[in-house]
Amino acid sequence: MVIILYTLCKDCNTKVPYGTTRCKECDSKFNEERNKRNNRNRYVRDKANEDAIRMFYVSTDWRNKRQEIIKLYDNHCAICRALGRYTEGLDVHHIVSLLKDFDKRLEDNNLILVCVDCHRELHRDNIDNEIKLNKYIKQKINSDKFTKKLLGIEK
């Protein structure tokens, strides 16, 4: 003879198997409410991050650091320069995005000067760390050499 033990649901006091805390109906309601609460908390947290980032981009610290980086790269896009081209760099790109690591926002080794086209490609291809950036630049260089060789510009 098997004896089945029961306990009461935390919410509605119906009989449920021992080891569970809620009946199926109450458990699904509880999970739904918990998910809503978590999503609301995530939204508030993301909104706070967006506000901090927005405030950072209008700060004096960012404007000064941006000018430093422009001078450091002599007003030229770092990626185009690696390809032997000299394009004016206008955008200072965060290699590791502010959403991933806000603490790296003013570190020189996390900032690179790029032209508008290269900046668009970096975001499109999700280049979000130094390893990916180096790999991306090497691929661009190899692709450029192949194109020049194909056109007979370089042997």
Image (tube, grey):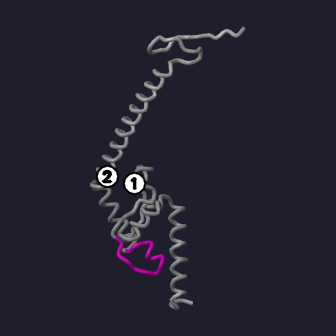
User: Residue at (43%, 53%) from the top-left corner?
Assistant: 104
User: Quick one: quadrant of the C terminus?
Assistant: bottom right
Mark 2 surroundings within 10 Å by alpha-carbon count, few (fewer than 14), some (14 through 19), many (20 or more): some
In magenta stretch: residue 100? no
Q: Is 65 in front, or is 45?
A: 45
* Number of the label disc, if any, that sits on residue 56: 2
User: Residue at (47%, 14%) from the top-left corner?
Assistant: 10
Q: Earlier in the sequence, mark 2 or mark 1?
A: 2
Mark 1 surroundings within 10 Å by alpha-carbon count, few (fewer than 14), some (14 through 19), many (20 or more): many
Relative height, residue 1 to residue 135 (above, below): above
**Coordinates of residue 56 in the picture (x, y in percent):** 31, 52
Q: Residue furthest right?
A: 1
Secondary structure beneath dot 2 equals: helix
Residue identified by numbered label 1: 105
Identify which amino acid the numbered label 2 is placed on.
Phe
User: Residue at (50%, 80%) from the top-left corner?
Assistant: 144
In magenta stretch: residue 88? yes
Instruction: Kindly check if marks 2 and 1 are in contact, taking CB atoms under 8 A apart as contact.
Output: yes
Magenta-drawn stretch, dominant element (helix, strand or loop): loop
* Number of the label disc, if any, that sits on residue 69: none
Secondary structure beneath dot 1 equals: loop
User: Quick one: quadrant of the N terminus?
Assistant: top right
Q: Is 62 in front, or is 15?
A: 15
User: Residue at (53%, 89%) from the top-left corner?
Assistant: 154
* Boundaries of the magenta span: 76-89
